[in-house]
Amino acid sequence: MAKRWQRVLAGDIGGTKTWLALYDAEPGGSLECVAEAKLASGDHPSLRSAIESFLEQSGASLDELRGAAFGIAGPIRGRRVQTTNLPWIIDADRLTEALTVESVTLLNDFHAIALGIDELTDEQLPVLKDGELDPNGPRVILGAGTGLGVAVVTGEGQVLSSEGGHIGFAPRDEFERALLAHLSDKHPRVSVERIVSGMGLEAIYEFVVTTGRAETSIRTKVEAEGGAAITEGALAGDAAAKLTLERFVEAYGAVAGELALVVLATGGLYVAGGIAPKLHAAIPDFAERFSAGMLPKGRMRPLMEATTVRLVNEPRVGLLGARRAALNAL
């Protein structure tokens, strides 16, 4: 076996899960995953605590670790970040000292996903909507999960981190105007993340049921199990759950289109996050409904029709991007 060249720790840190992995990079360029685990983020008071649990579970060692990188759901300010949906403050300098490594890199989670996309094959990036594609054009990556993440990749390959999931929600029709009014009674400001995310899926269902827009028989199950119960209910024929998924996917497409207009995403629009792959697998007309939300942009409709949309169908994409960042920093 070739002599180990460098070992790195990569992490994908979200509000729900923390995914950690150790990789060895060999001199010939091959990569070996030494250990990998997903942990419930809420079970830990800090990232350092999660790393310690990961090492205890896996039996792996950091003795020969050279670097680490973490994609984190939250805005990176210098070398610190306070996670958006967790009470964690992560300091890269303190982690560098605690892990005794050469470098620790912190990235927004969608910055890591943007890097990870370049590690994927076409089979892991199925096309949702065909269009024209400029390989040197800007790309937009967005994805709903616990929240709504966004990143932009310039034509030169520079990744621009973003908190685009927190732009204000702009309703398109009577249903969404009523939804906005309903949510405004609960929140001083309604961002698109309030609708296009895991919590948004539940919020739409609650609005549909509360306002009597469709009948449901699964309310108690949804209260206990959340979004998974809504998808299951829709497939079983529950009217409220079915309407919820339809409106969610169309709202998702509408937001994606707005973001694609901002940067003129001739390099493509990539739909990542934990929710879209599950819904794509469960709903036969997912791509059509996504496009139905995305395309109606008035005079800009031709630009939407020309935009290629791909699904990021690889759950490890953020982990792969963090690995790439860790290796690039050495």
Image (cartoon, rainbow, N blue to C red):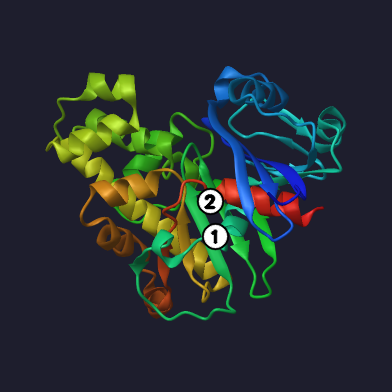
Q: What residue is at 74 percent from the left and 29 percent from the top?
A: 89
**Residue 176 visible in the displayed image:** no
- Residue 266 location (% of width, % of height): 51, 76
Q: Is residue 302 left or right of residue 38?
A: left
Q: What residue is at 36 percent from the left and 52 percent from the top?
A: 251
Neighbor class of circle 1 (other Cα within 10 Å; few <14, some 14-19, many 20+) is many
- Residue 284 location (% of width, % of height): 20, 54
- Which label was assigned to residue 317? 2
Q: What residue is at 66 percent from the left and 25 percent from the top?
A: 55
Q: Is residue 221 left or right of residue 26?
A: left
| Above-or-below relation of 302 to 8 | below
CB-based contact (under 8 Å), mark 2 and mark 1:
yes
**Amino acid residing under circle 2:** Val
Query: Which image quadrant is residue 207 in?
Result: top left
- Which label was assigned to residue 178? none
Which comes before the other along the chain, label 2 or label 1? Answer: 1
Towards the viewer: 270 or 39: 39
- Residue 72 location (% of width, % of height): 64, 40
Query: Which image quadrant is residue 47 in?
Result: top right
Task: Describe the element under mark 1 as helix, strand or loop.
Answer: helix
**Amino acid residing under circle 1:** Ile
User: To which residue does mark 1 refer?
Assistant: 117
Q: What residue is at 58 percent from the left and 56 percent from the top?
A: 116
**Residue 153 visible in the displayed image:** yes
Task: Describe the element under mark 2 as helix, strand or loop.
Answer: helix
Query: Which image quadrant is residue 253 in?
Result: bottom left
